[in-house]
Amino acid sequence: MSSPNDADLWFLKAIAATVLVAAANGTLDLNERARDELIRRGLDPEGEWVGPSRARELHYPTPN
């Protein structure tokens, strides 16, 4: 999957300032939120469809 450009990030203007501040200062982990959304969509870390169960395994591997 290609990297996003400015046109792909238009939605940031609609996000409440409190959410942006929390993300900027680290109290909101956007990486974790993004992983959880990818899992809900059944996508692996590269954005390819693998199904929700496999996506969860790939995003949150269990240590051996």
Image (cartoon, rainbow, N blue to C red):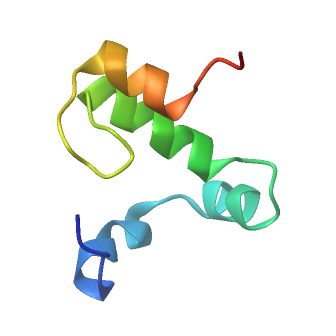
The quadrant of the rendering that contains the N terminus is: bottom left
Q: 8 left or right of 58?
A: left
Residue lying farthest bottom? Answer: 6
The residue depicted at 39 percent of the width and 46 percent of the height is 45
User: Splitting the image into 4 quarters, where does residue 40 fall?
Assistant: top left
Q: Nearer the viewer, residue 61 or 26?
A: 61
The quadrant of the rendering that contains the C terminus is: top right
How far across and down, in percent of the image, does residue 21 sit? 72, 64
Residue lying farthest left? Answer: 49
Residue 57 vs 46, above or below: the answer is above
Q: 30 left or right of 59?
A: right
Residue 13 vs 52, above or below: the answer is below
Residue lying farthest front? Answer: 64
How far across and down, in percent of the image, does residue 46 sit? 32, 52
User: Splitting the image into 4 quarters, where does residue 53 fall?
Assistant: top left
How far across and down, in percent of the image, does residue 56 sit? 44, 22
Q: Nearer the viewer, residue 18 or 55?
A: 55
User: Splitting the image into 4 quarters, where does residue 20 fall?
Assistant: bottom right
The residue depicted at 31 percent of the width and 75 percent of the height is 3
The residue depicted at 33 percent of the width and 39 percent of the height is 44
Residue 1 vs 10, above or below: the answer is above
The residue depicted at 59 percent of the width and 50 percent of the height is 31
Q: Nearer the viewer, residue 15 or 41?
A: 41
Q: How many marks?
A: 0
Q: 46 left or right of 30?
A: left
